[in-house]
């Protein structure tokens, strides 16, 4: 009986150590498993109650304090209604606010609407419906190359048909051009 157990253990140890890579993986997994196991034991046996040292508590209390005060001590903590500071606000110590900076008229801002954006949006409202040689049907009207196109956006932009291609047409307003394609 003892020899069968011994042979089984010997065979298992030979199988484990035969391949170095498998043996390394086995050792790492065994170590991680033992860490988790000890962690569970430590968490399971943690004390649930904190006890004060009776010698220190007796030394700190005075007999001059009335019994009613000894029994109940209330601590009041005032909590702010909102956050104490805004985490998204730049610190003025490191980033001082600069006053009196005027924006130059040639400086563009991301929030300002530029003329090119207005023109581009007006050009995008047009729709190419048909192409026949040098003639194109744009938004229900027939135009030849060079003819002015009616501005359907409501502005008084001068839009021209610049070029007619096989399946597209180029319309232009000043320096801005837009390619209309057949669907």
Image: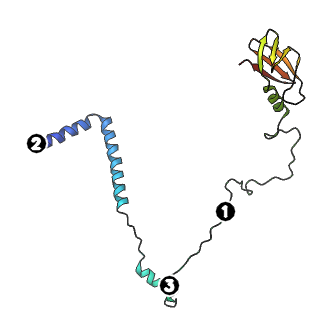
Mark sitting on residue 70: 3
**Few, some or many residues within 10 Å of mark 1 (<14, 14–19, 20+):** few
* Picture residue at 46% right of the left edge, 84% below the top: 59
Q: Is residue 106 above or below residue 99?
A: above
Q: Which residue is mark 1?
A: 84
Specify whether 75 is left or right of 12.
right
- Give 156 or 111, whichever is nearer the viewer: 156
Mark sitting on residue 48: none
Q: Earlier in the sequence, mark 1 or mark 2?
A: 2
* Picture residue at 84% right of the left edge, 22% below the top: 172
Instruction: Specify the quadrant of the image occupied by residue 157.
Output: top right
Colour pattern: rainbow
C-alpha gap between disc 1 and disc 3: 34 Å
Q: What kind of element bears circle 2?
A: helix
Counting from the top left corner in percent of width and height, residue 24 is at 33, 39
Q: Is residue 67 above or below residue 12?
A: below
- Give 45 or 19, whichever is nearer the viewer: 45
Q: Earlier in the sequence, mark 3 or mark 2?
A: 2
């Amino acid at each position: 009986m003892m020899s069968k157990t011994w042979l089984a253990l010997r065979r298992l140890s030979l199988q484990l150590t035969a391949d170095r890579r498998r043996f390394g993986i086995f050792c790492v997994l065994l170590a991680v498993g033992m860490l988790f196991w000890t962690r569970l034991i430590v968490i399971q046996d943690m004390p649930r109650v904190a006890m004060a040292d009776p010698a220190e508590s007796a030394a700190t209390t005075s007999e001059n304090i009335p019994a009613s005060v000894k029994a109940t001590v209330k601590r009041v903590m005032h909590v702010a209604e909102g956050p104490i500071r805004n985490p998204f606000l730049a610190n003025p110590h490191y980033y001082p606010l600069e006053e009196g900076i005027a924006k130059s008229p040639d400086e563009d801002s991301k929030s300002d609407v530029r003329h090119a954006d207005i023109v581009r949006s007006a050009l995008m409202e047009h729709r190419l419906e048909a192409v026949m040689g040098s003639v194109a049907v744009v938004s229900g009207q027939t135009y030849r190359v060079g003819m002015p196109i009616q501005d359907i956006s409501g502005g008084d932009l001068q839009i021209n048909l610049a070029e007619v291609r096989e399946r597209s047409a180029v319309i232009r307003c000043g320096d801005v051009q837009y390619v209309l394609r057949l669907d």
